[in-house]
Amino acid sequence: MTNSLVRLTGTDHGKAFGLRASLISRALSENRRGIRSLPEYLEYLADRTVCLTLLAGAGSRWLDSLKAAAAEGRAPNFDPARPRGLFPVRNVLGRGPDPVPIAAYAVDAFRGLGRRIIVVRGWEAEIDEEILKPLGIPEGERSFVTQEAPLGKPLGHGDAVWQCRDRWKEAEYVLVNFGGDASSPFTARAALIVLDALVSLGEPVGLLLPAARFDNPSYPITLDSFGRPASFGHAKLSGAAVPSGPGWANVGLRAYKASSLYALCETIRAEHWREGQGYSIPGNDPAGREFALDNVDARLAEGRLVRLLAAALPEELSPVKTLADVPAFEGAISRVRKDSDALLAGAT
């Protein structure tokens, strides 16, 4: 008999949002590991999971917005050399200082889900003092990895994940999010638990992709007749426009089987990396020379190894790319955290 989680991440994906409050309890009842206690399940998964938060992006649009604000005499009291993840925003965490750095929300979303890797380009001491310590994350539970920039700038989040592969390749699962996103602890927890439940059921899945419904998504997901992601649109990556209209889009968070992530990263690196030239991946903007996780996702989709968890709020995709995005981010994270707190309080 087909299990309900299989349907909700496939043909019945459109029902997942309405049933999101039951996703964790469904995973508890359907997994074949015999684990029916949520604390026990989370402990089991945390021992097998690495959580990557990426804070090393180039942030060219962010820097341009700071320069424009300075030229207009409205520059915030913020050193532009600091990563945008350290920019202060309103704190709705219910603990810690107010304001809090933007990236505190991405870091906090992975609380209790596994070993932490923070990918950076410097500023480790500030990240420790302003984010990790206020959140109660001790040094022994996290490590930093510096993303090298051989061509003078970081070459994409796929390259960042590849560079720190020795920290995660022996794990069973890898969660990835980004320091500028309005990350939801509920979505992160549900994604990991549902992914493991599907794996325990013998489902061929290498990536569970949390998604939300949008009127005109910037990164639309094309689904096959079984409700599985078949391809992805990404205007920045391809350097071309994407089709308009309502559809599903990933909200930034990804939940991978580590073995699948490693195999695809290794393959893409071997096929498309050229020393001194960067990456040359068909379909990517040639000028960027980047390797993105979207490229991994696309290859996994070709093998029908991606499942959709269509249970996220649209507000979870509210990244801070420029200074003008900050007010929208504060409004979005307020709703996301309230929603997450309520759902997790009701979880079994």
Image: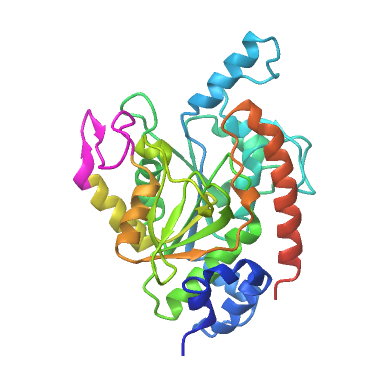
Q: Main secondary structure of the magenta part?
A: loop
Residue 101 x %, y %: 67, 35
Q: 20 or 347: nearer the eye?
A: 20
Which stretch appears magenta?
A: 270-290
Residue drawn at (30%, 60%) of the image: 302
Residue 234, image x, y percentages: 42, 43
Q: Give left or right: position of 323 versus 252.
A: right
- Give yes or no for residue 341 being in the magenta stretch: no
Residue visible at 66% across and 10% down in the picture: 72
Residue at 58% in and 74% down: 41
Based on the displayed image, in which of its 4 quarters is residue 147 positioned? top left
Specify the farthest residue to the front. Answer: 245
Residue 233 seen anywhere in this rendered image of the structure = yes
Return the x and y of residue 141 as percentages of the image width and height: 57, 52
**Left-right relation of 86 to 146:** right
Residue at far bottom of view: 1
Q: Is residue 164 visible?
A: no
Instruction: Judge whether 8 appears above or below 36 on screen.
Output: above
